[in-house]
Image (cartoon, coloured by chain):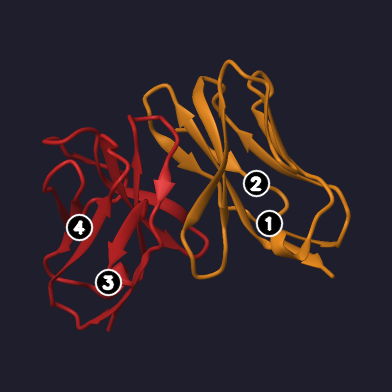
Chain colours: A red, B orange
Amino acid sequence: NAGVTQTPKFQVLKTGQSMTLQCAQDMNHNSMYWYRQDPGMGLRLIYYSASEGTTDKGEVPNGYNVSRLNKREFSLRLESAAPSQTSVYFCASSEAPGWEKYFGPGTRLTVT
Amino acid sequence: KQEVTQIPAALSVPEGENLVLNCSFTDSAIYNLQWFRQDPGKGLTSLLLIQSSQREQTSGRLNASLDKSSGRSTLYIAASQPGDSATYLCAVINTGNQFYFGTGTSLTVIP
């Protein structure tokens, strides 16, 4: 099992460009999450999907959109990237909300 | 809002020493608590999950304890090794299924 996979691993964008971060899990988990990690701020929840067909905002959703494509895949879209979105983005999944979480390797995004 | 604190922010110990990492939280109405390890430039690896009804959980050289009434969890690492060097994060899951992460303790084990 690959667990949680994320693509791309690294990305550099110019201000105003758009991109989609991809996440997939092969553990048949119902719930999936997107976090960002910034120095001194810890991990902050952007959006989550408690189950297929549902999505909800987390702590820092502004500037992002998500799509739960199917049970396996959960994508994060930046419509118009800003330097404040420079961060490391992690996708995670769990069997149900509040259960043990498993994380992907992360995407390092720089917006210039 | 739940606040999770991990002290110290950094810790350096010689190889072979037993050590304790601390995690404290402000709201004792929690559902679970999970400990993670993060290596530089990598994602988070789950170490242990303690349910609110449990007092401790063990995996190999790791032992995590939970005292809900005092708002504290500890991660005990026995006979530390250089390979244990990483950042250790705790996450508190409240009864609304929200995760609150601490900012971590960076551990260095010196050979």
Amino acid carrying mark 2 in the image: Gln
Q: Secondary structure at mark 2?
A: loop
* Callout in the foreground (4, 1): 4
| Pointers 2 and 1 within a single chain | yes
Q: Position of residue B64 (x, y in %)?
A: 69, 34
Q: Which residue is mark 4?
A: A76
Binning the other alpha carbons within 10 Å of mark 1 as few (below 14), some (14 to 19) or many (20 upward) gives some
Q: Pick whichever, A78 or B54, lies toward us.
A: B54
Of all residues, the one furthest to the top in this rendering is: B53
Of all residues, the one furthest to the front in this rendering is: A1
Binning the other alpha carbons within 10 Å of mark 4 as few (below 14), some (14 to 19) or many (20 upward) gives many
Amino acid carrying mark 1 in the image: Ala
Q: How far is mark 1 from mark 3, CA to CA?
A: 30 Å
Chain containing mark 1: B
Q: Which residue is mark 3?
A: A8
Binning the other alpha carbons within 10 Å of mark 3 as few (below 14), some (14 to 19) or many (20 upward) gives some
The image quadrant that residue A37 belongs to is bottom left
Q: How far is mark 4 from mark 3, CA to CA?
A: 12 Å
The image quadrant that residue A57 belongs to is top left
Q: Which residue is mark 1?
A: B9
Residue contact between numbered discs 2 and 1, judged by CB atoms under 8 Å = yes
Q: Position of residue A36 (x, y in %)?
A: 36, 58
Q: Which residue is mark 2?
A: B6
